Image (cartoon, grey):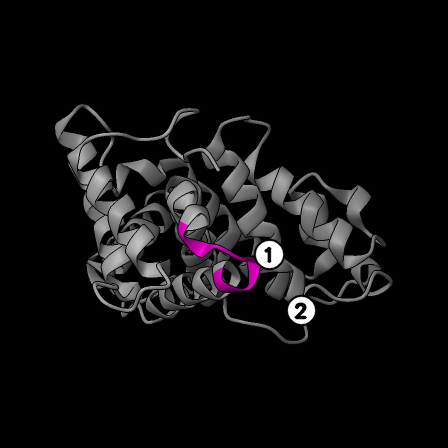
Amino acid sequence: MGTSAARRAPTGRWWRLAKRAATRYLSPEKEGGVEVREVVARYLAALEGSAAAGGPGALAAFSLTRKVAQDLGAFWAQAVSQGWEAVLNAWGVPQLKGQPPEIAAAGLSAALVGPGGGLEEAVARAALAQALLPHLPPQDYLQSEAGPASGPEPHLLVQHFLGTVLAGRLVLDLGESLEAAGRDFRRLQMGLAGLTGYISQAALASPVSSPSQTEHWRGLNGWLWVTQVLAAILKKLR
């Protein structure tokens, strides 16, 4: 599956421990198996361990993700307060008015993440589309002046996005070990569902007070809030 940090698989002592935990997690032999929380904790330890070898570390590895999360919060808060037509015009994507939700989600993720071709960008685009899709209205409603009639508060949508990105990065970095141990598609699918569910639950349990208005998401306040939330998620999962 490759890696979220580079085009080659991550190496080093901490990564070997993380990959070993991933293998044991999906191994059919019950003896010596590990639970979801150990796989995630080992993975985060590997990200932190990479800092000692000149890597970015866990928090810094998600710099672009944090910027996208901040923009997502601002976008959704603006959609709630000003309506779909106004927010799509403001963010430079008026062509998405009247599009089906699937196309709108993909277009919004591309606009908020940008054109970068790195793996962090790719994961962020996929995670953003996944987070937005359930909450976008039917295509004819995207042309109206009203905003989201229902859906999560901006901070909850952002937290969901952060958890989805973290799960996606883990699957990319440990994917080879997970696939090798999974043996069959059903076992692999169940294992991945366990990992993503565990991370998502931790992401939504962040206690950090959230920005309340569109302008609060922009600038330093929004950046600091997203950084604090991600730091709290990482701490909870270690």
Whether residue 66 appears in this view of the structure is: no
Find out whether residue 199 is within the magenta segment.
no
User: Dots 1 and 2: beta carbons under 8 Å?
Assistant: no
Mark 1 or 2, closer to the camera: 1
Horizontal side, residue 159 vs residue 237: left or right: right
Number of residues whose C-alpha sits closer than 10 Å to that of mark 1, classed few (under 14), some (14–19) or many (20 or more): some
- Residues 96 and 29: in front is 29
Circle 1 sits in a helix, a strand or a loop, which is it?
helix
Which badge, 1 or 2, is on the more N-terminal residue? 1
The residue shown at (62%, 52%) is 129
The residue shown at (29%, 69%) is 30
Question: How far across and how far down the image is residue 158, in percent?
Answer: 46, 58
The residue shown at (32%, 67%) is 202
Find out whether residue 185 is within the magenta segment.
yes
Q: Quadrant of the C terminus?
A: bottom left
Q: CA distance from mark 1 to mark 2?
A: 17 Å
Question: How far across and how far down the image is residue 128, in percent?
Answer: 56, 50
- Residues 134 and 197: in front is 197
The disc at residue 148 is: 2
Q: Is residue 13 above or below residue 103?
A: above
Q: How many numbered badges does the structure rendering display?
A: 2
Residue under label 1 = 130
Q: Residue furthest bottom?
A: 150
Q: Is residue 187 above or below residue 57?
A: below
Horizontal side, residue 224 vs residue 123: left or right: left
Indicate the amino acid at tag 2.
Answer: Pro
Residue 196 position by quadrant = bottom left
Q: Is residue 72 above or below residue 198?
A: above
Residue 142 position by quadrant = bottom right
Q: Is residue 41 above or below residue 120?
A: below
Horizontal side, residue 54 vs residue 149: left or right: left
**Magenta residue span:** 181-187
